[in-house]
């Protein structure tokens, strides 16, 4: 039996673990790594059907407020 893992799932787990940590002030490098990992996660998930569904949801919410 062979297991595979998606890069976006792995990155999502890493982001959740990083967000569960203390909110004490960190270093600038720590903040940059968090921002970079979130941007990369967004790029990875954007091409999936789930990413398109999120985009449609945000677009409809935006249209409802205007």
Image (spheres, grey):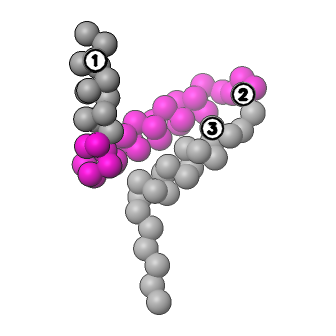
Q: Quadrant of the C terminus?
A: top left
Q: Which mark is residue 23?
A: 2
User: At numbered mark 1, what does the secondary structure look like: helix, strand or loop?
Assistant: helix
Q: Quadrant of residue 24?
A: top right
Q: Which residue is mark 1?
A: 64
Question: Residue 19 appears in which quarter of the rendering?
Answer: top right
> What separation in Å lies between label 2 and label 3 (alpha carbons)?
8 Å
User: In screen coordinates, is 4 left or right of 54?
Assistant: right
Residue lying at the far top of the rendered structure:
66
Please say if 1 is above or below 9.
below
Which region shows up in magenta? 24-53
Is 2 or 59 nearer to us in this picture?
59
Circles 2, 3 touching at the beta carbon (< 8 Å): no
Q: CA distance from mark 1 to mark 3?
A: 30 Å
Residue drawn where x is 24% and y is 18% of the image:
63
Q: Residue at x 72, y 28 (%)?
A: 23
Q: Which mark is residue 19?
A: 3
Q: Is residue 39 shown above or below 27?
A: below
């Amino acid at each position: 039996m062979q297991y595979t893992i998606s890069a976006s799932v792995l990155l999502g787990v890493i982001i959740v673990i990083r967000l569960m940590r203390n909110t004490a002030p960190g270093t600038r490098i720590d903040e940059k790594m968090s921002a970079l990992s979130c941007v990369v996660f967004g790029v990875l998930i954007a091409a999936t059907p789930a990413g398109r569904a999120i985009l449609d949801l945000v677009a409809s919410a935006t249209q409802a407020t205007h």
